Amino acid sequence: MKIAVVVQRYGQTINGGAELHARYIAEHLARHAQVEVLTTCATDYVTWRNELEAGVEQVNGVPVRRFRVKRQRDERVFGRRSHRVFEHRHSLGDELDWLEAEGPTCPALVDYVGKHAADYDFCLFFSYRYYHAYYGARAAAARAMLVPTAERDATIGLSIFPPLFRSVRALMYNSPEERAMINAVSANQDVPGVVVGIGSEVPQNPQPGRFRQKYNVRGPFAVYVGRIDQNKGCKELFEFFQGYLRDPSSKLTLVLIGQELLPVPEHPRIRHLGFVDDADKFDAMAAADLLIMPSYFESLSMVALEAWALGKPVLANGRCDVLKGQCIRSNAGLYYESYAEFHETLHAIEQNRWLMGALGRNGRQFFREHYDWPVIERKYLDMFDRLKRDTPARAVDPLPGWFDRRRQDLPAAEEVLRKLPGGPVLAGAKPVPAEPRGPSTSPGHRPSTSSGHGRRRA
Amino acid sequence: MPDFNVRADSVNVEQIMEQIRARIREKRGVDYTEQQIRDLAAVKLEKFLDPKGVRSDLLEQYRKLQPAYEPPELPNYEFEETTLYETHRGLLRFIRKLLNPLLKLFFNPNKLVQALHIQARLNTMYAEREARREAARRASDQLTYELIHNLVVETTRLGIEAKNLKMRAESLASRLEFNERRARALESVVVYKADEGEAPISPRPAPTPVSIPAARPAPTPPQQQGPTAGAQTQEGPGQRSRRRRRRRGRRSGGPAAAIMGGQPSTAQPQPGAPDESGPDNRDAADESPETNGTATEDLAQFSGAATHPSEPVAHPSDGDAGQGPSKTDPETQ
């Protein structure tokens, strides 16, 4: 079996959520099939500048074929087009222009996929929102599988994506919430799909003591791992935690790990360690009392899964449906939607050791049952087997003609998003239409692991 | 393979969250979510306040008053050297160009072009400045509207909070009044019984600094009887009435719970000073053990009568104002 993994960026040093997801999947599927990665020469997701050599190279034993990006992203043009399609009534042509502006515009990659699709059994496209996935999946529709990594942001409201969700052979979702959202936006319930997610390379014996000694961290602490960014909910976290510190019974320190894009408040009980390597990261998580995940937008929080794998409870932002759903399904984390809830939940975890232990145990069990690598690999292999037996039933909807593309009859993506059902997917619970959560999505917002409504066009 | 299922375990996150929310509601009184407060602010504020003239849908009203802003399309004021001779007809342009030197014989068009060019630039500058001002004014208006809107929301929030606090204050006041009445009733019962029990009081042992409950029916060890027994027998009616007066004085001045032997005082007993089961407690126990127990329990709950943290704690050695007679009190010896 030969599999092509098509992703916007790829490399050992690229730690973006969807890119890391693609690398892990490629490396693990390589044990069961012949895997080739098709990607661009870019390493920066903002500019898509060509920084790597085009051609074939090996990354961790997996062949990677790189193609040059035709043009870099122009932030001003992208911002203007984003504003147009997200906020105003617009045309299909506007959306296609937005996709071009977003990039990575790499026609060579799409041509290659179109010409060589027959060489692969399946082509696995990552991140629905990018140029390579949209045009690549259309070029190889009969073999295309999509890992959408969709989040609840305005992009999902664009009309170009529902036909894509309906035309691929299968979708590998990250969470039940993501599946419910994509089903609602594109009515693609008949397309085979499974909630898979991703595993993680969690070390068997992390060294919490070593971490405490190395960074001189004493006493109980909560850890946050990830970009320190407003889009990740860090601003709110700082406000809430500073409020919590005023509680005389609290002993927790907040330890932050990751690149700082937002000023970290100066307080003896808020410590920023900067970017650390994986060993230190896992040691820190093992030493921590809990992990705090303040993000509003997540399609799947790998960090939360890693914390659970290490038996640590998670305190998540309840306004993120995926995180809330994960906490409830796993019974391994609490969530907050206001300062009062943040204070009480954090206090409950800090003061009740049995609760902390029970949540951690549930988390470890949840990870083993759903996110251990053998489980993930099995879900992919089962899907390949199923698709091999089935014959592709539908053809790709052709793009409309010149006049239809310029008809200004599509609603603003934000408006579509507002009408989508929200809330965590729980057994017996029915999602309700919800307002978008968290801060408004800026045009430059990028998904953390990374994700359309529209109408079926004739 | 099933995707996910909810695991049954001893911990139920939803249940814990419910408990946490209930605790938050308890702490904050009525708990409104942000959305609920906004909804409340959107309805008529008269329900909560009396804001004569304040309209709850201010933001909407402002938006209605102000039409959607479209930046004005600036007119084309450009005036260059060639503008005078411009035409879309090629032949005409050629002829004009050809005759231009002839025109210059009659007057100097350059001056005219220059003046018009300057005027065009002035027009453009003015139009741009106006557009900028208009945009700034719009932005400022938006901020003002937001501010007013937020004020309305905050006013509603404060109104709700004030109402909650008022209700809580009323509830506390009524409880306080009830408990005061109850305490008075219990005290009168105690006093009444004490009067009735005058006859059995006389054989009672006199108060001593020794912290042994004398009210107990158990026989007193002989070594503890000596001077105490003597004092008992020497107690006269005058002493009894004085003791009663002291007791009344203590009831009105000292913490009732401590007097009645309820909640222990925060002050540590001094070495050699009588403890909680000292003479006064013995008196009370003698008077009515059952009533005393009930009163103690009730009064312990009574916030006004219980020792308040801010109240000065009476020291046992402070004489009449204290818990009981001091070791050196001449009246008790």
Image (cartoon, rainbow, N blue to C red):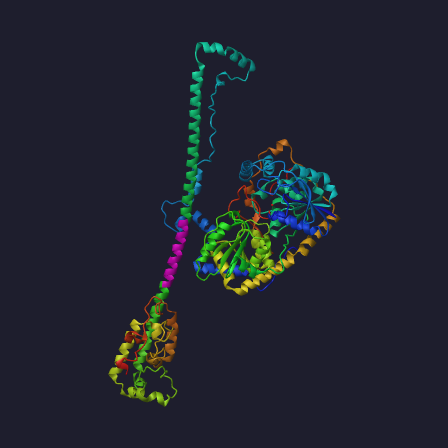
Q: Position of residue B24 (x, y in %)?
A: 46, 59
**Is A88 in front, or is A8?**
A8
Q: Quadrant of the C terminus of chain A?
A: top right
Residue drawn at the location 56% of the way across and 43% of the way down = A154
Tell me if residue A186 is in the magenta stretch: no
Q: Position of residue B118 (x, y in %)?
A: 43, 22
Is residue A375 positioned above or below B105 on the image? below
**Is B30 in front, or is A301?**
A301
Question: Is residue A397 visible in this depiction of the protein?
Answer: no
Q: Position of residue B333 (x, y in %)?
A: 28, 83
Among the 4 quarters of the image, the one containing residue B298: bottom left
Left or right: where does residue B320 sit relative to residue A84? left
Q: Hey, which residue is sitting farthest bottom in the picture?
A: B222
Report the predominant secondary structure element of the magenta stretch: helix
Left or right: where does residue B173 sit relative to residue A80? left
Q: Which residues are magenta?
A: B154-172
Residue drawn at the location 69% of the way across and 53% of the way down = A377
Tell me if residue B159 is in the magenta stretch: yes
Q: Position of residue B193 (x, y in %)?
A: 32, 79
Q: Hey, which residue is sitting farthest left in the picture?
A: B238
